[in-house]
Amino acid sequence: MQSAAQAWLVYDISHDSFYLGLDAFLAQFPIILFSLVGGVVADRMNRRNLLLVSQYVQMATAFILTALVMADVVQVWHILCLSFVVGTAQAFGGPAYQALLPTLVGKDDIPNAIAMNSIQFNIARVIGPTLGGIALTTAGAAWCFGLNGLSFLAVIASLYLIHVRYVPAKSTEPILKSMREGIGFIRNKPGMDGLIVLAFGMTLLAIPLLTFLPVFARDVLHSGPKGFTQLLAVSGAGSVCGGLIVATFGKIEGQGRSALMILVLLGGIIFGFSQSTAMPLSLVLIFCSGAAMMMSMSMVSSLVQAVASDEMRGRVMSVYNVAFRGGMPIGSIVLGKLIPIFSAPVIMGWTGALLAVLGLYYLLVQRRVAQL
């Protein structure tokens, strides 16, 4: 809900796609700066407590943005600063969350747990934009931000209720040494380096499709906030379907090869969406892109989780988090600068083609991921 309203608010205030990209960049850049440290911290303290702090900070920023909009003093720089604060909180909460999740289930259930987690996240993406669109068009952006702040109360209450089976042992080892151990663990596992590159490539080339949906909604499809929220909601619905497919089949034979084939398909779908000028066709393609994006990302994530031990999980997932989240700000800031020059359809068409090439490279040339 907040992301939809925030994206529209930034574009409505600035009328410049560069600020859309900059906002996404500042929300994700702290992941690059602090996630490795966050991974070390997640391997040294109760991950639930670390995650709780992250949730409290994000809730506070939502309420601050609500107050700024209600007072009618909000400016783009306010939104950009708060996005950076949220990104910093997620840099520590992300590794803690990803390391905590597999310890709540058995190892054989990890793919299903990751897929089900993706489903609940994307159900929120379906419901959120729908409610956000209603709140945005009828009551204003402040309601979107305020309701988002209240939603953190349910997450915080749930964290207090869960039983944590694994609590990392305390350590006095230097942080840099712990980081090196995590990176060394990844380098010594066959195919892991390829999975990290794929995580970066997917978010670099695929996630900007969602970041720049306001541009497609307004300038290409000639629709307003209603069309934008329709695109977001249908994309989320596709992601839910993709997550259900992964959860149904769980861990499958040749999961690495399957993830790469879906990644190639995703590149083709993004290319097709970029060339569409009809809303019905765009809705079909954004649904398919959501499903393909979620399936490929869930499969890659479950492969990484399957090889990480509990005592190394925070550090391994922090490196994965840097790659996965690091592609978003770079893609957003670069494409945000290129779109006004070459147009959104041209730039997103190229990103779709590059994504397909990346998948084909690991599928046909460098085959260590395909063999997992």
Image: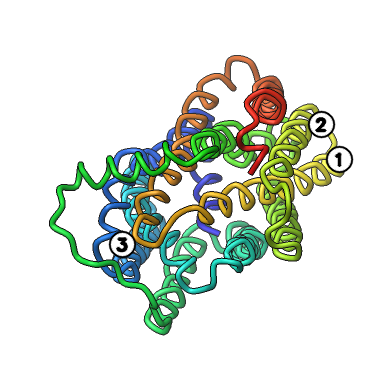
Q: Distance between the residues labelled 2 and 1?
A: 7 Å
Sequence-wise first label, 2 or 1:
2
Above or below, 21 against 279 in this view is above
Helix, strand or loop at mark 1: helix
Where residue 301 appears, as percent x and y from the top left, is 56, 51
In the rendered image, the vertical position of residue 340 relative to residue 280, given as above or below: above
Q: Earlier in the sequence, mark 1 or mark 3?
A: 3
The one nearer the camera, 307 or 268, is 307
Residue located beneath label 1 in the image: 281
Disc 3 on helix, strand or loop? helix
Quadrant location of the C terminus in the rendered image: top right
Viewed as shown, does residue 211 lie left or right of 352? left
Report the amino acid beneath label 2. Ser
Measured from the top left, where is residue 352 in percent x and y?
70, 28
Whether 11 is drawn above or below 45: the answer is above
Q: Residue under label 3, please give it.
A: 57
For the residues labelled 3 and 2, the Cα–Cα distance comes to: 40 Å
Q: Name the residue under label 2.
A: 276
In the picture, measured across the screen, residue 186 lies left or right of residue 190, that is left
